[in-house]
Image (spheres, rainbow, N blue to C red):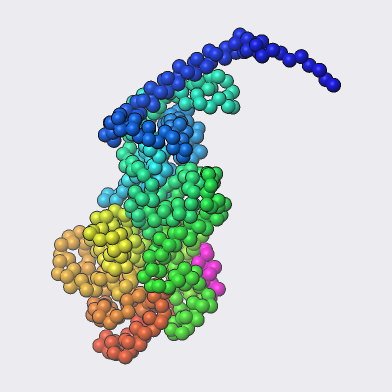
Amino acid sequence: MISSRLVPFRLIVLFIESKIHYSKKINTVEHLLDNNGALAHAIVQHALDFYNISMGELEAFITATQDDPTGDSKTHVLQALKHFVRDWSTAGRHERTPTFPCILSALTHHFPAALRSAPGASPIRAALPGAGLARLAHDMAALGGFDVTANEQSAHMAVAYRYLTTLHAPDAASFHPFLDWWSHQATTADLVRQVAFPDAPPAAPVLFVEGDFAAVLQQGSFDVVVTLFFIDTARNLAACLESVGRLLRPGGIWINTGPLLYGTNPLLQLSLDEVLIAEKLDSGEHSTIGFLSGLTGRNLRTGLADVGAPRMQSMDEANISRQIVSHINMATPTPSEAAAINDELCRTTRAHPTRFASFAALPMNDPEAAARELKRAVTDLGFVGALLENHVAGRYYDDMFFWPVFRQAVELDVPIYIHPTFPTGEMIRVNYRGNYDQASASGIGAWVFGWHAEVAVHILRLYASGFFDVHPKIKLVIGHMGETLPFMIARIQQWEAGFKEVKRSFVDVWRTNIYVTTSGFFTLPPLRCLLDTMPMDHIMYSVDYPFHTNEEGASFLEQIEKERVFDGYGGDEAYHGFVRGNAEKLFRLE
């Protein structure tokens, strides 16, 4: 047995008081808590004024909810106050540094300054759900060219942010944020230390929207959604990812940073690889593939992925000897992404070199890199040209910023296919939104009409800018029976004298530099209009598979043959060029 003498508790207390001065520490903390209370009172008072709430209404609310077992106002208040430290103080800079620069770098990578600052360019619409006190949102807006919407559901965070916006000088307020956390403190000085904020007052304009982001932010209107330490707070992660996807316009980008440290009772606890899989599946429901799948009633995902036996069987049944395939860009690829896309496309199509050829994907945010990638794709990979989306976040190719790509195409003597793409959120707002639902606006702005009209306007922009004077040998391909231009040729010719800065007539450009495919337009009136306005060797049959079926294309050809449409336009020789020879010559497929 081991015996010991216990020190009386009274002596321990005397020792603590004489050596540690513990009661003085408690008194100091109590005094500093009063200082924190003054800050909390100022925040509440500003909130009452901002939201036009009387003190009586607030007190009645407190009385009605003080026994609510689900409430934890103290925790929420402390979290909001500590966000002053992380987001808006010098002391919190070490917490921001590992994440904020990463996100800002990703934004400037996908949306370079030259793109954002171009004359006439629409702002990049960015959403930040779960913004907290919105420091990241203001840093995003400070980049320039971004229209930033910060969103926060927590009322405690919202009132703290509203108060923050009244502080117009650095370090205008201060408090002691760690008084409630006595564990793991190295020194008493750490416990009672004071933190001043803001280190830099909010300057760049940000729209701050309160409420559940899935309900209060407009669907399909953002070019980029940024989430930081956010998705793991969702109880239903699948619903959260779906809601993020619904915010994005087709082709939009989601940037996420943060842990997967799931909260209380989550329905799903996915690993990172599972989140990525879920995100890809979700984006397919609400992006280009999802919209068009709803229109056509077919499984486009399977059709797009198949470059093997099932596709070739469908080609054989429709008497199609060869297809030119391309990647669907849901967002403008980076140089490394474009190279990876083209390498994969090359590996896929080289397995059947007599059945498939390829268009390159290009990183058009970086035209010099895009020109280099085009050269690599053509000379090293054997591609027959490139397919470009009709605009890059609302910026068109009449901007000389993009012209290095077209100079390279002329040097390589390969065509560039300008393909319709979805309008930006700003374009939808200005041109396509009206007294009808979002689905109608999306249809009008895309497959119903907007796609085709936007490409037609783009060709006119190129013409008016002198693009074709600078690049007289450029070969541009457009689809869908000429994207409404054949119908407008006479009208354009009537007024082309108004284009005073150009040397060539539009009809000369139309008949020399432009090539047209049918691509999914399978009726005779637009074909006859095209035949009346375009040289026979510039018109090519195209299906737009899998968005349209090879069977639809075959039925269209049968109708052309039955009604002998080409009899007045060169007969069998012109028809052979239409279905095969013109494409073989343009893309050098013999």
Write the residue at 31% across / 86% down: 560
Q: Position of residue 394 (x, y in %)?
A: 31, 55
Indicate yes or no whether the magenta region holds residue 169.
no
In this rendering, position of residue 521 left or right of residue 21: left
Write the residue at 63% across / 9% down: 14
* Magenta span main SS: helix
Q: Position of residue 339 (x, y in %)?
A: 49, 59
Most extreme residue toward the right is 1
Write the residue at 33% across / 32% down: 60
Number of numbered tags placed on the structure image? 0
* Residue 344 higher or lower than 535, as above or below: above
Q: Split into 4 quadrants, where in the image is the N terminus?
A: top right
Front in this rendered view, residue 560 or 444? 444
Write the residue at 55% across / 73% down: 351
Quarter of the rendering containing residue 404: bottom left
Q: Is residue 144 visible?
A: no
Indicate yes or no whether the magenta region holds residue 351.
yes
In this rendering, position of residue 295 left or right of residue 19: left
Front in this rendered view, residue 447 or 1? 1
Front in this rendered view, residue 111 or 502? 111
* Residue 377 higher or lower than 530, as above or below: above
Quarter of the rendering containing residue 455: bottom left
Front in this rendered view, residue 442 or 178? 178
Q: Position of residue 138 (x, y in %)?
A: 37, 38
Q: Position of residue 501 (x, y in %)?
A: 20, 59
Magenta region, residue range: 343-352
Q: Is residue 226 visible?
A: yes
Quarter of the rendering containing residue 527: bottom left
Q: Split into 4 quadrants, where in the image is the C terminus?
A: bottom left
